[in-house]
Image (tube, rainbow, N blue to C red):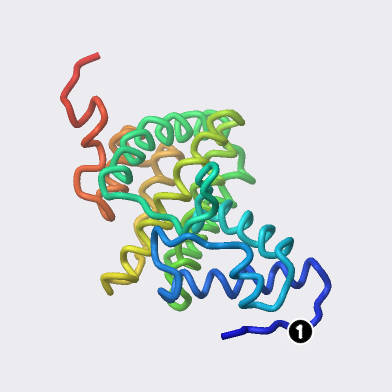
Amino acid sequence: MTLAIEELPSATLKSHLVSRLREGIIGGRYRPGERLNESKLARQYGVSRIPVREALMQLQEQGLVMNSPRRGMFVNSLSEEDAQRINSLRIVLEAEAMKLCRAHLTPAMDANLTRLVTAMEEWEQGSELDAAALDLEFHRALWEYSGNPYLVRMLDLLVPVVLVHHVLDSIAHDTARWTLNHHRALLEVVQGVLPVSPEEAIRTHLEIGYPNPGRFSSLGLNIEA
């Protein structure tokens, strides 16, 4: 079956392909772990391989696709154990980001974080991936406000992958819709309003989606400093 696309400017064509492939992944046409062959996709959509490659690279940045060296692009597939290992790192890294954010917080930063939390609390319609994007926007703001670009880079490498895994898993198993109304506690810890440590706050936050998110960390192993 050929899914021909009209002649479009290159930037528009790439965006169109990203949208079509994104819908295919979320809709289950392309399954977790499935290889996304550039040539095959180019034939399906009636385009050259270059815009397909560019679209796949953008989907990789979004966490929907992963690149396996010498094997190609695959729909993101993450085991539950791998997701928990990432969450264990996230407790440590994001708690540090929250501490630094609190130290550097300006009225403008506070206002933006508050705006994002309010938007999440009022969110009602949209896809699971749209909800995850709003979720990630809040967390990315926290990381950026830490002032440490290396910390941002590490979190940006890890968190989108586990968020997309959670989205695809909830869609595949028809579980409850993505919930966004549990971020105010993180904001209040950063603001110094809620007397809870950043480590405890982020761990409690992650427990909403994953049981025992600190399983693979020193917290889960009860290792004393």
Is 194 left, or right, of 101 in this rendering? left
Q: Image height check: is 148 above or below 33?
A: above
* Residue at image mark 1: 6
Is 15 left, or right, of 25 in this rendering? right
Residue at the top extreme of this rendering: 225
Residue depicted at x 30% and y 47%: 206
Q: Quadrant of residue 6?
A: bottom right
**How far from the left and from the top, in percent, is residue 33?**
40, 58
Q: Quadrant of residue 109?
A: top right
Is 156 left, or right, of 204 in this rendering? right
Q: Quadrant of the C terminus?
A: top left
Q: Quadrant of the N terminus?
A: bottom right
**How far from the left and from the top, in percent, is residue 162?**
39, 50
User: Which structural element holds mark 1?
Assistant: loop
Q: Counting other residues with Cα less than 10 Å from the Cα at mark 1, is it few (<14), some (14-19), or many (20 or more)?
A: few
Residue depicted at x 53% and y 48%: 67
**How far from the left and from the top, in percent, is residue 49?**
70, 64
**How far from the left and from the top, in percent, is residue 217?**
26, 29
Residues 216 and 112: in front is 216
Residue depicted at x 49% and y 58%: 64
Please count the marks in the image.
1
The kind of residue on which mark 1 rests is Glu
Residues 105 and 46: in front is 46
Q: Image height check: is 103 above or below 161?
A: above
Residue at the left extreme of this rendering: 222
Q: Image height check: is 195 above or below 76?
A: above
